[in-house]
Image (cartoon, rainbow, N blue to C red):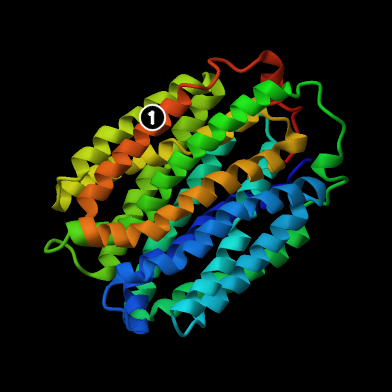
Amino acid sequence: MPLNRPTLLLLNLGHAFDHMFLLIFATAVSAIAADFGFARWEDLMPYSVGAFFLFGVGSLPAGRLGDLWGRRRMMIVFFMGIGVASLLAALAQDAWQMAAALTLVGAFSAIYHPVGIPMLLAATTRPGITIGVNGLSGNLGLAAAALITGFFVQLGGWRMAFAAPGLISIALGFYFARVAPAETEAPGRRAVSAGELPRTMLLRVFVVMTFTAITGSLLFNLTTNGNAELLRERMQGVVEEPAMLGSLLAGVYVVAAFSQIAVGRLIDRFEVKPLYLCIVLCQAPLLAIAAYLEGWAFYALAIAFMVAVFGAIPFVEGISVRYVDDRIRSRVSGMRLAVSFGVSSIAVWLLGPVVKAAGFDVLLLSMAGVSLCTAAFVSLLPAKAPARAQATAAPPPTRN
């Protein structure tokens, strides 16, 4: 389906919004905890687990609806729904109301990955760079959460950090409905592609994608939800102003996000497996060393390990575009995301209690061990994608 430039821009912006909305709470958790009467931010963190659980399990119905009902329609629901849910979070008066609103944010956030990314990939002849740019957009959303939320907390309070983006997202939903081209038929209604993989190969790839996504999502959730407080702890006595800390964290995410552009270009040129192994094998030593550092030395290592964490993100979609036919891609992504994000949501629930009991150094060392598990799963991936599967990764050129 040909996509015009405004639609392409909105699909990438949607990825930024997806991650930004999920991280507003984690960035502002200290201020919210104080407002709700909690002595420690760690005690409030478990209330956000519903958002990340539904962010995972909600991908299954979202992917199915994307393939069978239409990806354009689902993206309109995404923009509108996440905006309304964020407004409800801004109105929360206690921890349980916040938990309910965040769970709703997670439910609508679940739409983007199994719907928005396949919608982009179906309209490109360069899937690697498309994934890289889209990944960059998503991680700039993390930077925006750190930067914007920090300034709102300092200047106007945490409620505005939810309300303003919520209103913007609703407006973008109306704009997307206006500019996105209508689908002639839902992807799942199309004829079977000649390049579709045998079920046994597809099952093997799905298992590898799922388990690498679980470990990768654990790292992603632990870092992105814990980095604000981790940076606050390790920069104590050096930088303590919320706005400055937010700016430093945004800087980490911006630098790390650009690694996905380089990875995307490499995916278009080389086999996925060796590239993926190289990236994940860099994660463990960087995380382990960071466990013992403070101040500016820690900040430098934080940039390095986040480059490795973010640099690994495009590979799961890279595997999908190499092996999975577009007519079922949203459903396959939905199933994989439901398992991986659903399981990894436990990281958000454990983050506060683990840090409270053992500290961030133990958390960082544990994450190093998780990265080694990712490498073990990647080693099970077939060395080379079959030629007929690779043919599906390069659809006929379309005009934008």
Q: Position of residue 159 (x, y in %)?
A: 45, 79
Q: Residue at x 54, y 30 (%)?
A: 208
Taking the spot 56% from the left edge, 37% from the top edge, the residue there is: 131
The residue labelled by disc 1 is 279
Q: Decide if residue 112 is in sight here.
A: yes
Q: Residue furthest left?
A: 237
Residue 396: quadrant of the picture: top right
Residue in the image at 52% along x and 19% along y: 271
Count of all numbered marks drawn on residues in the image:
1
Quadrant for the N terminus, please: top right
Residue 97 image offset from top left, x and y in percent: 51, 79
User: Where in the figure is residue 374, as x and y percent of width and height?
Assistant: 42, 32
Mark 1 crowd level (few <14, some 14–19, many ≥20, 10 Å Cα):
many
Quadrant assignment, res 204: top right
Is 117 rendered above or below residue 200? Answer: below
Q: Secondary structure at mark 1?
A: helix
Query: What residue type is disc 1 on?
Result: Ile
Say which quarter of the image contains residue 24. Answer: bottom left
Residue at point 39%, 74% (across, down)? 152
Q: In this image, 12 relative to 94: left or right?
A: right
